[in-house]
Amino acid sequence: MSLLDKMLKAGSVKGSTVLSKSSFFNTKDPIQTELPIVNIAFCGSLKGGLLPGLTVVAGESKSFKTLLGLYCMKAYLKKYPEGVAILYDSEYGITPEYLESYNIDTDRVIHVPIEDVEQLKFDATKRLDEIDKGDKVFIMIDSIGNLASRKEVQDALDEKSVADMTRAKQLKSLFRIVTPKLTGKDIPMVAINHTYKEIGLFPKNIVSGGTGIYYSANQIFIISKSQQKEGTDLKGFKFTINIEKSRYVKEKAKLPFTVLYDTGIQKYSSLFELALESGHLCKANQGWYNVVDQRTGEVIEPKRRLKDIEADTPFFEGLIADAKFNEYVESKFKLTTLEMGEAEDDREDDLIESDTE
C-alpha cells in the first residue's frame, strides 16, 4: 500500500480524495438573472450569475435589496424546474401575491417565519443537513438586520433594559455553521441586511451584524440610491450595487441601474455607458450617438438619440453576444486568478488583526 493510499484510508472525514480527482471544486454553474448588470455584479461577466455560497445584500430602507433577492429566486426556480426555495422571513412584508407578480411559483417556495437569530440558526442547520449534494435548493433570508437575539427577546419580556452582547456572536455562529454546508452542497443563500452610518468625520455605510457575516460571505453588495429626475419631476431612482466584498469581482466596483415609475426596471442599465467606454458607441454631439462597426472601426450612420438607443432591444442583445464587448466587461470587473489570491490574503490579514469576538 502506497503512502497516499495509507493516508486516504486513515482519514475519518467523508469526501476525502486526491485533489486532482476531487469533484469538490467542480466548475460552478452560474444562475443568470434577467438583469445583465446583476450578472456582472455576481461574476464580473455578462455570462455570470448567482453562485453557491453566501451573498449578503445590504442597504438602507427601500433600496431594492429584497427585490434583488427575489430576482435571484426567480432565476433559480426557472433554471431548475425541480428546485425549491426556502424563504426565511423576519419582516413579514412578502405576500404570495407579491411573489406571483414577479412570476415566482409560490407552490415551490417554503415560507419560514422567524423571530430570532437562534431560531434561524437551528432551523437552517437542520434543513441544510437534510439536503444532498445535487438537490436544487435556493435559500433567502429577509432579513438579518431585523432579527433580534433570543436573549434580547427574553430581556424585553422580563422588562430588562440592558445591552445585548450575544446577537453578533449568534450571527457569527450561524454563518460559521451554514457556510461550509452551502459551499459543499452547492446551495446559494441570499441574505438581506441593513446598513448603518459609521460615526466619524467621513462616515461610511457599515453592514450590521458584526464581523462574522463579513468573513463568511462570498460576496457583499451595499446598495445605494439616488433620485432620477427630469427637471424637477421625480421619475424614479438610480440604484448602485457597490461591491464591498467579492471572490470574483474587483472590490469597490460600482454597478448602477435605473428603476422608473412608468416603465419599471431598465433591463439594460449601464450597458450604454459600457458600450461608450468599449468603443461600441461613440458620441456624435450633445444627445446624439453613433454605433461603431467593430470589424471596420467605421461609424455607422445615421446618428441616433440616447432615448432611441436605450429602447433598442436588438442592439443591446447583440452587444451582450459580442465577444469584444464581453472581453471589455471582464477586463473591467472580473478578478484574475492572481488577484483572487491576493484578495484572500488581504482578508486573512484583516481577520487576524481585527477579529476579537
Image: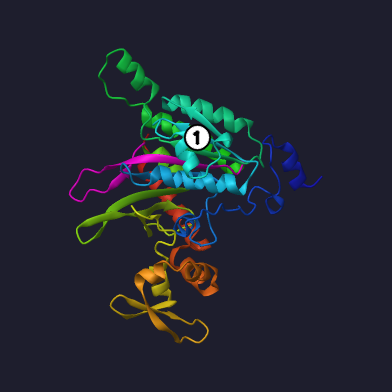
Q: For the C terminus, give its image quadrant.
A: top left
Q: Is residue 121 above or below residue 46?
A: above
Question: Is residue 55 shown to the viewer in this render?
Answer: no
Label 1 Cα neighbours within 10 Å, binned few <14 / some 14-19 / many ≥20 = many
Q: Is residue 162 left or right of residue 50?
A: left
Which residue is pictured at 34% across the width and 40% down the height?
194
Q: Is residue 240 above or below residue 110?
A: below
Q: At which x and y percent is residue 163?
A: 27, 24
Q: Residue furthest right?
A: 1
Q: Is residue 349 above or below residue 92?
A: below
Q: Is residue 70 left or right of residue 52?
A: left
Residue closest to the eye, 306 or 202 = 306
Which residue is pictured at 37% across the width and 47% down the height?
64
Task: Tell me the kind of residue under disc 1.
Answer: Leu
Q: Which residues are magenta?
A: 185-209
Residue 297 part of the magenta segment: no
- Residue 291 sits in quarter: bottom left
Q: At which x and y percent is residue 164?
A: 31, 25
Question: Is residue 319 shown to the viewer in this render?
Answer: yes
Q: How is the image coloured?
A: rainbow
Q: Is residue 30 left or right of residue 334?
A: right
Q: Is residue 225 above or below residue 45?
A: above
Which residue is pictured at 76% across the width and 42% down the height?
6
Which residue is pictured at 40% across the width and 61% down the height?
269
- Residue 32 sits in quarter: bottom right
Q: Residue furthest top?
A: 158
Q: For the N terminus, give its image quadrant.
A: top right
Residue closest to the eye, 260 or 219 = 260
According to the picture, the residue beneath numbered tag 1 turns out to be 87
Q: Secondary structure at mark 1?
A: strand
Q: At which x and y percent is residue 289?
A: 36, 78
Q: Is residue 340 left or right of residue 21?
A: left
